[in-house]
Amino acid sequence: MDRLKTLVVCLGLLTAGQCVAQDPIESVVNAAVNPLMQTQGIAGMAVAVTANGKQHFFNYGVASKETAKPVTENTLFEIGSVSKTYTATLAGYAQALGKLSFSDKASQVLPALHGSALDNISMLQLGTYSAGGLPLQFPAQFDSADKMLGYYQQWTPAYAPGSHRLYSNPSIGLFGYLAAHSMGQPFDQLMENTLLPKLGLKHTFLKVPQEQMGLYAQGYNKQGEPVRVTPGALDSEAYGVKTSAADLLRFVEANMHPATLEKPLQQAMALTHTGYYSVGDMTQGLGWELYHYPVTLDRLLAGNSTPMAMQAQKAQWLSPPQSPTQDLLINKTGSTGGFGAYVAFVPAKDIGIVILANKNYPIAERVKIAHQVLSALSR
């Protein structure tokens, strides 16, 4: 079956000779999503697929149980840690412009960090969660904009810089903060006024404007209670983006076809898709995580597992770094208290998928949907 041709089903029982056209991608997505929403109690989902330059949007359920407003491709969802891929792109842009080097030590970029462990930790180590054991979240007493620098000034590494991967918001959050500092503007301002417009993303926000609030989905926690993300230290850099399936798919397409962008942004994209070290079958890029394609479901699940997110793993650095020109599946998960997101794409096949939901449901279920759909598309 050609994945881009219309599947024609003749309904002879209804009207002789009459046929109804069905999108074969829709059949695959429906078969994966409908049972999941039932078993996981998800109010609303938006799935977007790109294949050979053609976009497909599939919307399910409601953006809010209270208003019963249906999900569309323009509904705004919190994407949690998928935000890290935008942060990585901004940092790559800063290096492409010559504003910083990933080999710079963090305290070279921000003198306020002099005398701390950050004297010996590079920007690349911050961007790849290998600074030496920065935790998943900030301790509560430091989880605000005015306290967060004090955390880094007193933090003591548990591992030698570069030796271990420990997934961390404070690690990549500081990476983005320092990248913006090197460009002489606040992070939010650079994202909203520079990076997002240059990427053609007009429906992606760090703070949802009042006039867009009607499109902002309501998230629901595991008890079914309405929740949305709350401010925290480096939240914009680590988990703060809100976007729609349509705009996130545009971001995926920009990643797959960067030649349409200005040269520094092309270089930034290449830096985010470069493999710096491996942990098992997963190769760490900047923001993105990479797998040689084709990849089995089991390997993809292992790379997106709880131990990978919560436990320190020895990093096997690649010398030289892995070129982004290889056949790769590039992916990232993201969650907040009331939302779950997953993005995966295969540039060599020109296929990609965005999965957004207004509930934080198990990551393994998101990976299964994406693997099922991408496998069908690549046949």
Image: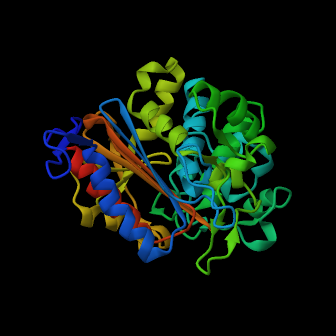
Q: Position of residue 42 (x, y in %)?
A: 51, 69
137 with respect to 39 (left or right): right
Q: Is 194 left, or right, of 18 in this rendering? A: right
Q: Residue furthest bottom?
A: 223
Residue 122 drawn at (x, y percent): 58, 47
Where is residue 20 drawn, in percent x and y?
Answer: 24, 42
Quadrant location of the C terminus? Answer: top left
Q: What residue is at 63 percent from the left and 70 percent from the top?
A: 220
Answer left or right for 371 relative to 40: left
Q: Quadrant of residue 323?
A: top left
In the rendered image, the quadrant that contains the N terminus is: top left
Q: Residue at x 45, y 48 (%)?
A: 288
Q: How is the image coloured?
A: rainbow
The vertical placement of 315 against 350, above or below, is: below
Nearest to the observer: residue 11 or residue 71: 11
Q: Position of residue 71 (x, y in %)?
A: 55, 53
In this view, which residue lies farthest toward the right?
146
Does 1 appear above or below 309? above
Residue pictured at 79% horizontal, 67% vertical = 142
| Residue 378 visible in the displayed image | yes
**Please, is residue 21 above or below residue 314 in the view?**
above
Foreground of the two, 54 or 257: 54
- Who is closer to the viewer here, 167 or 229? 229
Residue 270 visible to an observer of this rendering: no
In the image shown, does 129 or 337 lie closer to the viewer?
A: 337
Residue drawn at (54%, 68%) of the image: 360
Residue sitting farthest toward the front: 15
**Residue 217: which quarter of the image?**
bottom right
